[in-house]
């Protein structure tokens, strides 16, 4: 094997992860500038987050709007005044647990208690009947209750879950981020999971 061939092999190996990221970015609809598509100019920080505009999903902002994107694992929030916030999330672990469509925030709770759903208890009978607020609570420090039974947007004490398929249907945020989102969201805020 010549030196030139070894060098090309090493360079191809180093470029492969970034080419995969660019393909994923294009797959989810992120438009890359032409100069970013060349392997010679690939950036190392291409994220799977994509830009979403509230008008693509809602007629009006009303008291605010949330789009939870299960593909890019991000929650987009627009306040009634048009302010915008983006939060990384965890998403449901499987397609069968993923619900998509329109719902709304029907309640809010700081220091929520957690009650496993009947299907969770069926899958794992050892789950406790109720977990009070605190560091062992899977809902974290704050929860937004949706009009779909058992579905929440909530915090988590397990920071390893964020950015992954790790929930039983809910959308999870870092505790610090749900604490930031919580006062911004009014009961009645429109929500769409995509």
Image: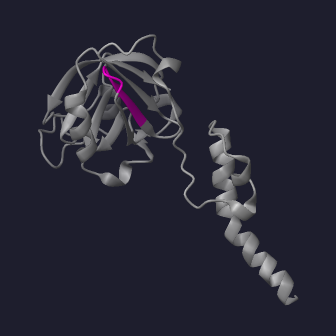
Residue found at x 33% / y 12%: 62
Vertical arrangement, residue 11 with respect to residue 61, above or below: below
Residue 188 sits above or below residue 182 on the image: above
| Quadrant (top left, top right, bottom left, bottom right) of the N terminus | bottom right
Residue sitting at 54 percent across and 57 percent down? 45
Dividing the picture into quadrants, the one containing residue 108 is: top left
Q: Residue 83: image x %, image y %?
A: 34, 29
Q: Residue at x 73, y 77 (%)?
A: 10
Q: Is residue 85 above or below residue 6?
A: above
Among the 4 quarters of the image, the one containing residue 117: top left
Q: Along the line of sight, which residue is nearer the eye, 100 or 4?
A: 4
Specify whether 136 is left or right of 53. Answer: left
**Magenta segment, prevailing SS (helix, strand or loop):** strand
Direction top: furthest residue: 59
Q: Nearer the viewer, residue 116 or 104?
A: 104
Rendered location of residue 151, percent (x, y): 33, 25
Confirm whether the magenta stretch covers residue 93: no
Which region shows up in magenta?
Answer: 75-82
Q: Is residue 148 above or below residue 134?
A: above
Position of residue 83 in the picture relative to residue 56 (left or right): left
Picture residue at 24% right of the left edge, 45% below the top: 175
Is residue 139 at least partly visible in the picture?
no
Question: Residue extending furthest right?
Answer: 2
- Give the image's coloring scheme: one colour
Residue 119 location in percent, x, y?
35, 28
> What is the total number of numbered labels drawn onto the structure image?
0
Residue 147 seen in this snapshot: yes
Instruction: In this rendered view, identify the residue nearer to me: 27 or 92.
Output: 27
Please provide percent x and percent y for residue 113.
Answer: 15, 34
């Amino acid at each position: 094997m010549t030196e030139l061939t070894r060098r090309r092999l090493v360079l191809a190996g180093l470029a492969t992860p970034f080419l995969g990221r660019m393909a994923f970015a294009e797959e989810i609809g992120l438009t890359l500038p032409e100069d970013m598509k060349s392997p010679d100019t690939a950036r190392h920080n291409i994220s799977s987050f994509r830009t979403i505009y509230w008008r693509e999903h809602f007629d009006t902002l009303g008291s605010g709007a949330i789009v939870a994107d299960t593909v890019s694992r991000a929650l987009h929030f627009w306040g009634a005044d048009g302010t915008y916030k983006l939060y990384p999330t965890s998403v449901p672990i499987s397609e069968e647990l993923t619900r998509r469509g329109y719902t709304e925030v029907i309640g809010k709770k700081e220091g929520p208690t957690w009650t496993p759903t009947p299907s969770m208890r069926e899958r794992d009978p050892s789950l406790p009947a109720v977990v009070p607020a605190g560091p062992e609570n899977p809902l974290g420090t704050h929860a937004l209750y949706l009009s779909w039974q058992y579905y929440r947007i909530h915090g988590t004490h397990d920071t390893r879950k964020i950015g992954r398929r790790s929930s039983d249907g809910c959308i999870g945020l870092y505790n610090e981020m749900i604490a930031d989102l919580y006062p911004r969201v009014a009961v009645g805020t429109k929500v769409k999971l995509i």
